Image (cartoon, rainbow, N blue to C red):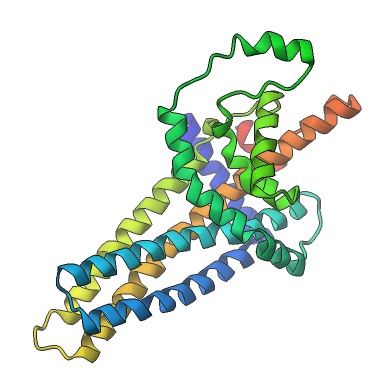
Amino acid sequence: MLSLKKGFLFIRAAFREAIKSPQLLKPTWFFLLGGLILSLIVFIPIGLVLAFIGTGFWGMALMGVFCTGLLFFLFVWGEITALMTACFFAKNLDGEKGDLKSTRELMRSTWRDVLQFEMAFPALMLSKWFGPRRKKSAALPQAKKSKQPVIQDNWQDALYLMLPLLSFEKLKLKAAVERIRTLVGKNLLRFSPGLIKVQLIGAIILLLSVASGTFLGILVGTELSGNPFASMFQRLSAAGLSLLTASITASIGIAVNAFVRVIYHTAIYRWMINVTEARRRRKPELAEAPPILSGVLNK
C-alpha cells in the first residue's frame, strides 16, 4: 500500500511540475493532435470495408484489425512524443528551458527505434518470464579476473531506461540495449522502479481508458446505426463518430500513462547519472536523486 501511495504522490508531483512549466505538456498536445490525424487516416479503410463488405463476419473482423492497429500506433506515437517530454523535463531539472526545434529533430531521428522497440517488447517480456535462466555463479569469477562488467541475464528489468537512453545519449536501439546490459552488469541500477508504483498506476489508467473507449465507441455506433433502414451515409457517420469517441477516450489514457512513466523513468536515469558522476569525481554529495523523486521517497 505504501508503494501505491508513493506512486500517486509522484504522479501528483509530476502534474505539479507540468503546471509550473506548461512546456512539459506541449508533447501531450502534439500527441493528441497526431492521434486525431491517425484516427482520420484509419477511418478511410474502415469506411471502405463498411461500404463494400458490410457488417458481416469478415467486415467486422477487418474493422477490428484496423481498430487494433490504430490502438497500437497510438501507443507508439505516445512513446515517440514522450521523448520530447523527457528532454523538457531534463532541462527543467537543470533550470533551463527546452528547445522545441531540437526535440522535434530528436523525434524525427529516433521514431524508427521506438517503433522497433515497441514491436520487440512483447517478445523480450516473454523471454524474461518463460526463458531459461543462466547460472551466474560460473560467470562471476571469470568476470572478476578479466575485470569486465558482468552481463547479467536480468537486463530486461531495466528496459524502462530505453527512452531516456534514446533521448539523452542519442543511441540507436542496438547500442541502447548493449548500454542497458552494461549498466546492469556494473550494478549501477540500485533503485528498483517497482518501489514506487508509477508504472502500475499508469498501466491501470491506460487499460481503463482503452476499455472505456471501446465500450463508448460500440455504444455510440450501435445507437446511431441501430436502424436497419439507415442509409450508407448514416452508417459511415456512425462509424466515424464511434471511432472518434473510442480514439479520444483511449488517447487520454495513453497520454497520461506516457507522461507519468517518462517523467518517472527520466528521474531514475538522472539519479543513475548522478551516482556515476559522484563515483568518478569521488564526491558522494553529488549522488542525489532529483527533487521530484527524493521528495516522494522521503515521505
Compared to residue 133, the image places residue 107 above or below, namely: below
Q: Position of residue 219 (x, y in %)?
A: 21, 70
Compared to residue 87, the image places residue 245 above or below, namely: below
Residue lying at 20% horizontally and 81% vertically, measured from the top left:
224
Horizontal side of residue 51 vs 274, given as left or right: left
Nearest to the observer: residue 83 or residue 114: 114
Residue 107's image quarter? bottom right
Nearest to the observer: residue 243 or residue 183: 183
Residue 229's image quarter? bottom left
Nearest to the observer: residue 238 or residue 137: 137
Which quadrant is home to the N terminus?
top left
Horizontal side of residue 49 vs 109, given as left or right: left
Q: Is residue 15 visible?
A: no
Q: Position of residue 145 (x, y in %)?
A: 77, 10
Residue lying at 66% horizontally and 60% vertically, measured from the top left:
84
Horizontal side of residue 278 vs 198, given as left or right: right
Q: Position of residue 195 (x, y in %)?
A: 54, 30
Q: How many numbered dots are placed on residues in this image?
A: 0
Q: Is residue 26 visible?
A: yes
Residue lying at 24% horizontally and 91% vertically, measured from the top left:
233
Residue 9's image quarter? top right
Residue lying at 77% horizontally and 30% vertically, measured from the top left:
275
Which quadrant is home to the C terminus?
top right
Q: Residue furthest left?
A: 228
Q: Residue furthest right?
A: 281
Q: Position of residue 96 (x, y in %)?
A: 81, 57
Compared to residue 187, the image places residue 160 above or below, namely: below
